[in-house]
Image (cartoon, grey):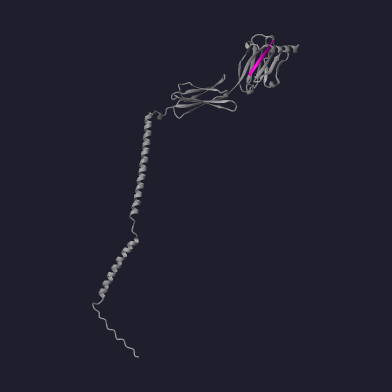
Amino acid sequence: MINGAFLRVSLVMFSFPKGETAVIQTQQTVVAAVGEDALLSCQLTQPKDVLQVTWQKVFPRGEVNVATFSEPFGPKVINNFCDKVELKDAGLQSCSIVIRNVTEQDEGCYLCLFNSYPDGALTGTTCLQLYELHEPTLHVRESNSAEESLVSCSATGRPAPTVTLTVTQTHLYLSHYNVSVNNNNRTVTVTTTAVLSGFRDNSAQVGCAVRVLSVHKEVFVMIPGLKQTPADGFPLMVVLTCVCVAVVIFIISIIIFIRFMLKRRNSLSQSDTDKNKTPQRPIRDAHENKTPLIKQENEQMRQRTSAKKSPKSVCPKPSPPTPRRLL
């Protein structure tokens, strides 16, 4: 009798088209975080004569049974899903399954089939969509200008998160841009950076809101008001004038120094040139010039002395005759 009943149900399932899903109440999309448990539920909106409830997972190649419930056999999970799926609140009018520790392999669509007689199979579809969203990080730092602040917010998730910056006080966005980076684990890191201005007098609160699917997170940080320093009170023209005067003085000092060095170098070069044009006479020339004069004076003195000593006329004495030699 039991086998005949299930055989009749099978014949009904294949001989009649699938019923309309209006009589089945289910959530079309179930969003779950990676690593959490996901609950998929189906229930009839009208009482039907149901013989068996079957849950199936949809694959590209076709549907695969995951779990079944019937009064004769009770809840039953197919072997391949025993460690993953659990039937909860199982009944012929309402039935749910829990998918433990969901991963990427569990993502997809599932069918809940109420095999009824004589309506056939009443089918409802619910899809499991996974998300991953980490806590956002918000950084505030000063820019090159004292009146501006750089605000940067980063968030990592799957699919790519939406990052939005908000400011509670009057502000001005000078620039705003997003950068996305795809990670190896199929997550996406999105960074939003903005240059904010107008926080000189009052402090402001900056918020960063991130969203993935229907899940959102938000963080806030305070931007302290910028205190005016004495230097800020000077007009811009005065500051520019002081800078220009300092630059001019520096340039003039450099010019004077360069001219002094050039003049000094020219003086040294002229002195060296004069020395090369008028060479000194050798010392030995002076000695050579003095020596003839001394010799001349000595010669004159000798002549004078000789003249005084010699007589006016001197007669030579006759020499005696040389004797002849006798033969």
Location of the N terminus by quadrant is: top right
In what quadrant of the picture does the C terminus appear? bottom left
Location of residue 170 in the rendering, given as x and y in whole percent from the top left corner: 45, 21
Q: Residue 188 sits in which quadrant?
A: top right
Q: Which residues are magenta?
A: 109-116
Q: Please say whether residue 51 is visible from this viewpoint.
A: no
* Vertical position of residue 245 compared to residue 20: above or below: below
Which residue is at a point 38% across and 31% down the rendered structure image?
Answer: 240
* Residue 297 x, y percent position in the rendering: 28, 68
**Side of 326 relative to 51 (left or right):** left
Q: Main secondary structure of the magenta part?
A: strand
Magenta-colored stretch includes residue 110: yes
- Of 33 and 201, the residue lying toward us: 33
User: Which of these two is toward me, 128 or 136?
Assistant: 128
Let me know if residue 307 appears in the view: yes
Q: Is residue 220 above or below residue 24?
A: below
How many numbered tags mark residues here? 0
Q: Residue furthest left?
A: 312
**Residue located 27% across and 74% down the image:** 306
Q: Position of residue 65 (x, y in %)?
A: 68, 18
Please report the residue visible at 45 percent of the width from the left and 27 percent of the height from the top.
Answer: 148
Residue 126 image-quadrant placement: top right
